[in-house]
Image (cartoon, rainbow, N blue to C red):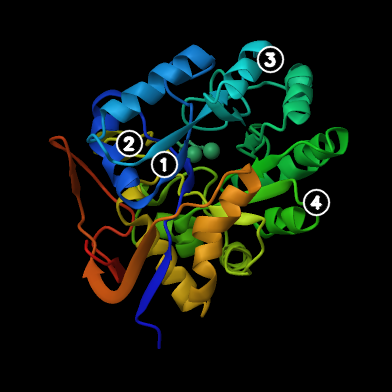
Amino acid sequence: MTDTITIRRPDDWHVHLRDGAMLEAVALFTARQFARAIVMPNLSPPVTSAASAAAYRDRIMAALPAGSGFTPLMTCYLTDDADADDMARGHAEGIFTAAKLYPANATTNSAHGVTDVAHIMPVLERMQEIGMPLLVHGEVTDGDIDIFDREAVFIDRVMTKLIRSLPELKVVFEHITTAQAVQFVDSTGPNIAATITPHHLHINRNAMFAGGIRPHAYCLPVAKRELHRLALRKAATSGSSKYFLGTDSAPHEVHAKESACGCAGIFNAPYALESYAAVFDEEGALDRLEGFASEHGPKFYGLPCNEGRVSLERRPAIIPENIDAAGSPLVPFHGGATLNWQIVGS
Ligand code: NCD
Ligand code: ZN
Ligand code: ZN
């Protein structure tokens, strides 16, 4: 049995670092494990311009100790009246790595999102032209569609058409949660990829109702049936370069989670790599963790792999139930449970 593994330093291709005091509290958890991260732009107000992204990048760097070696990769939040020139300029200047499509009102801070993809076709055409990846929160927002079906319906109604009309556009289907998404990604060309979160590999929808309502297991897209979790585990550990690590770590203050109308989002940054390692171990695929965590993402984004290395060892650890975030506690994913892998030196 393998008891220690060493992989290239990984990157997180989807994370919410927030802003202000929350940013100060959480940034280090990501920077400690990952060399780079694709930082989501769903602040309030959202990051829609190159200037606001550059300012946000500066705030992220200021929240980290000097010499952290961490590189935030910034994204542009697309709205119905997105400015293609500003976005393309930001991309050319190295401020924007990608742009993010939130269907309006699909998730946290998405009120300014896109109401119809038809409205942003000129922007998407420009992205295809300059090779700028489009990151998609893939859920329809139609209240008539069952919440557990919103990703699958998005594939049928939006994704399929999108890739047909823009066949060269690089698209990352973010935080996929269904067997249908896996099937879709597998059936497309190399310009279509997906991120998979640790929580969607560990939990199915029962976790939200285990003995009572469990707000800390609630995120969007919501966890689905067991058959979907198994399809995601198979995809992540398959060795296919279409799948890569994206934690979707999305912290919310405890009172905002434990509420009559609790926020969606799971805070998994503190033990993200350990969480993925446990899955790859359970699937007998530890030899494929490096591809998923450290190689497939850079390859898709056209960036070099990191040169540093990180080692994990099989050593059980109880994950704390709360993590202090500058005086206010946050509840981490796996809080109170045991994970069998630890980063060496942690
Ligand atoms: C994210 C957040 O809180 O910003 N929440 C979540 O449940 N994943 C938004 C998102 O990624 O959809
Ligand atoms: Zn999302
Ligand atoms: Zn997210």
Give the mark toward the camera: 4 or 2: 4
Q: Secondary structure at mark 2?
A: loop
Mark 1 or mark 2, earlier in chain: 2
Q: Are marks 1 and 3 in contact (CB under 8 Å)?
A: no
Mark 1 or mark 4, earlier in chain: 4
Note whether 160 is above or below 288 in the view shown: above
Residues packed near mark 1 inside 10 Å, few (<14), some (14 to 19) or many (20 plus)? many
Residues packed near mark 2 inside 10 Å, few (<14), some (14 to 19) or many (20 plus)? many
Q: Are marks 4 and 2 in contact (CB under 8 Å)?
A: no
Residue at 33% x, 44% y is 31
Q: Residue 265, labelled with which disc?
A: 1
Residue marked by disc 4: 189
Note whether 315 is above or below 114 in the view shown: below
Residues packed near mark 4 inside 10 Å, few (<14), some (14 to 19) or many (20 plus)? few
Toward the viewer: 264 or 259? 264
Q: Are marks 3 and 4 in contact (CB under 8 Å)?
A: no
Note whether 190 is above or below 3 in the view shown: above
Amino acid type at mark 3: Ala
Quadrant containing the N terminus is bottom left
Residue marked by disc 3: 84
22 sits left or right of 181 in the view = left
